[in-house]
Image (spheres, rainbow, N blue to C red):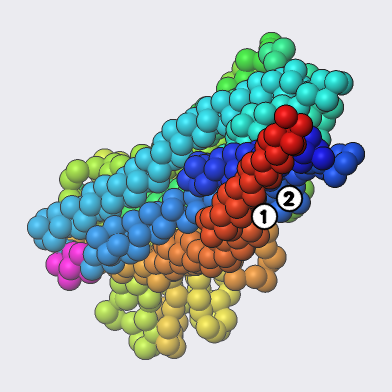
Amino acid sequence: MSFNLMNIGTSGIRASTELLQTTSKNISNLNTKGYIRERTEHTTMIGNQVGRGETVRLLNEFAQKQLNRDISNKTYYEQFVTEASRVDTLFAEDSNSLNKSINSLFNNLQEAMNQPSSRVTRGLFLTDAENLTEQMDRLSGIVFDQGNIVNQQLDLFANEANNLIQKVSDLNAQVASLNTPTGTKASSSVLNERDQAISDLAELVDLETLDGPNGEKLVFLGSGQALVMENGTFNAFSLAGDPDPNVRDLKLDVRDGQAVALEVNSSTLKGKIGGLLAFRDEILHPAQNQLGQIGIALADAFNEQNKKGMDLDGNLGGDLFTIPSVTGFAYSTNAAASTAAVTATLEAGKGNEIPATDFKVTYTGLTTVEVAAVDSKGNVIGTPSTGTITAGNIVFTGPATPPDTFGLEVAITGTGAIGDSHLIKLNANAAGNIELATDRPEKLALASPIRTKTATDNIGNGNISVGSVSSTGTGSNFTAGPPPSLTNGTITLQKTAVANQYTVTDGSGTVTFLAPPPAENILSTAGAPFNTYGFDFNIEGTTQEGDSFTVEFNTGGFDDNRNGLELSKLQASELVRENVITTSTADNLQTFNEAYAGLVTDVGVVANQAKTNGAAFEALAAQSEAWFESMSGVNLDEEAANLLRFQQSYSASAQIISTARTIFDTLLSATR
């Protein structure tokens, strides 16, 4: 009997010791990151003795997987909001407002119009124009710097993810080697370390796990690509820009050196890496393209209108701004033998046709191409336009009539293979590279190059309008000179005896025509060659036979501000294209101020939406963590109670041994 008591007491002490060790381990690892609470469980042996205990981790794998998913969502929005808020603050800051610079430019233009012959007021306008280009360059630099920060962080996060993937793979190998058919199991510390590595990886990307053979954990991206596979093999992240080396693409670099491109969808990738990519694609690149689009549209509008005027030197107006050209990026999949090089700029006068996108030129034949607007992920927007390569330039041919050229002037040298593609990033590079084309205030063309006169001896009360100029370039009736002039000389308009009939005469000859009331666009009504002169005028009032009117070059008309008035109208004109996809009846244009305000608003709206979503996922992550911790986390109150309980159990078992010894001693004494 005493022998049985001794065995019972001994097994009780052993069991209580194991329980106390487990409890002590839980308490001491209270602040150990990734530690999973343990519990020792015993079975009853023959004779009701306590068997050898088995220590297990209290882990709810479903709760663990849910926590990892919520962590990925939480860190995705945390990263997105951190980056987006910084850009939102920069754009919303009053000192960075492009609209202030635009408004100041037009205010000084108004001052120059009030004194059109003053070089001082013209100089103030030119100074403001230079300030505007510097402002666009500064804003573009801010966006460009943020892009560099994104690339640096992507490098860091990719390296961190690779280290964690390698770590999980190595720990899998340890677990597999420790798990044996004889029943040996991997230690809890190895399993905890592996689970923590997977949790850390979930902060970077969205992932899923599956149980593999011999206790291994197989890890996959949420989109299905394998990161950690069986037998210690794994994939690692690499970053390479294709075609733009400054825009990193996420790839899986398989161990044998083959790179497999990932279809990265920021809405499913999640984690910090997903947040960075989403910020880049949804805020950074669109903002950079919109800035460039506004700058191009404004510079082109000023250039085209200034050309329709006469400057203070008495010459026809020229460009005020220089719009840059860019070289396209060739895709890595292009044929090795391809020698094609693509350059692009804005076609003069088409600044209101360029959308805030990038563009992709793809060879469909040896001399035929498709040109498509693409978003920041390279997806085609709308319907691509077709064209042929003629004399080194793309001539757009369809599919619409007229075709959508996107405002581009594209030149191609060399030869390309069918399927070759080039990415054009004109907008992205424009804002930081638009410059003034002149530093002379005299080049601001405030005057109109024509002036009209009504003969003083006319009988009727008819008058000729001041005229409007639509073109001074090739094909018009203007000769640049020097000195500049009307190519065919002064134009004379005379009323005939026939009702509503006039004759128009200049160096090209005389044309007789009818101009019924209202007598508008007289030269267009007269027909060739007058309808191609690049300017026109109206006759107002009632004219009588013999009444005459003249149109001549505005020589010495420096106090004239008629073209300045047209320049000032650009501020309220809708000259910035809003969408790629549109209809003939849609309102698809906006003013410069509206376009920039829309840019700031878009950034703010996306940032605030991300904040709202981030708060929701932060709450979900906190809930999942509480659920996981309720099972796997260490509770000091519970462990302290266990410590007292197991201590008492140990004391009771020791007392059993003491009692057994006393009985045994008594029996020995009785036999003496």
Quadrant holding the C terminus: top right
Q: Which residue has dot 1 on it?
A: 631
Q: Secondary structure at mark 2?
A: loop
Residue 30 vertical placement versus 261 (above, below): below
Task: Tell me what residue is drawn at x 87 percent, y 21 percent.
Answer: 181
Q: Which residues are magenta?
A: 108-115
Q: CA distance from mark 2 to mark 1?
A: 7 Å
Question: Is residue 222 within the magenta segment?
Answer: no
Q: Amino acid at mark 2?
A: Asn
Q: Amino acid at mark 1?
A: Met
| Prevailing secondary structure of the magenta residues | helix
User: Disc count in the image?
Assistant: 2
Q: Which mark is residue 60?
A: 2
Residue that extends furthest to the right in the rendered view of this protein:
46
Q: Does residue 459 appear anywhere in the picture?
A: yes
Q: Which mark is residue 312?
A: none
Q: Tell me: 351 left or right of 652.
A: left
Quadrant holding the N terminus: top right
Contact between marks 2 and 1 (CB within 8 A): the answer is yes
Corner quadrant of residue 420: top right
Task: Tell me what residue is drawn at x 52 percent, y 38 percent.
Answer: 425
Task: Tell me what residue is drawn at x 85 percent, y 20 percent.
Answer: 182
Task: Tell me what residue is drawn at x 20 percent, y 64 percent.
Answer: 108
